[in-house]
Image: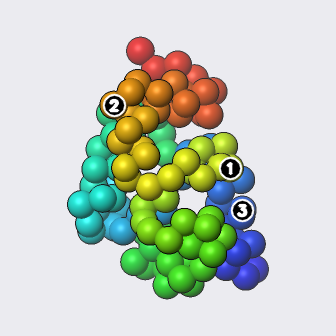
Amino acid sequence: MDTLDRVKKQVSENPVIVYMKGTPDFPQCGFSARTVQALNECGVEYAYVNILEDEEVRRELPAFSNWPTFPQLYVKGELIGGCDITLDLYRSGQLKPMLEEAVGKTVA
């Protein structure tokens, strides 16, 4: 399976997935750390891919998404954006309902 097919599969099989530098427990850049913090505050499960451990994804994902930077957040197969957009959605109260709807549950 080539890299773009793998990315398409990951994005389609995970209602919420973030491509980031590092892991949620050990982010490797400030933007990834802030994105993960917002996701964690929403209380919804999400998948992640550490692009520092997958050079092919790191190289190919910007062409797939037409988004040059990381992290990249996808919800229900669609690119939401990077850190700034994720934080804006979180601060406005829009991120949590978006994520809850994507995973099909309501978190109290």
The image quarter in which residue 82 lies = bottom left
Which quarter of the figure has residue 67? Answer: bottom right
Tag of residue 91 = 2
Residue annotated with mark 3: 9
Considering the numbered disc 2 on the image, is that residue within a helix, a strand or a loop? helix
Give the crowd class for mark 2: few <14, some 14-19, many >=20 residues within 10 Å.
Answer: few
Tell me: 68 left or right of 42.
Answer: right
Q: CA distance from mark 1 to mark 3?
A: 9 Å
Amino acid tagged 3: Lys
- Quadrant position of the C terminus in the picture: top left
Earlier residue among tags 1 and 3: 3
Q: Residue at x 60, y 79 (%)?
A: 60
Decide which of 91, 23 is in the foreground and name it.
91
Query: Of helix, strand and loop, which one carries label 1?
Result: loop
Q: Where 40 falls versus 65 (above or below)? A: above
Residue 77 numbered mark, or none: 1
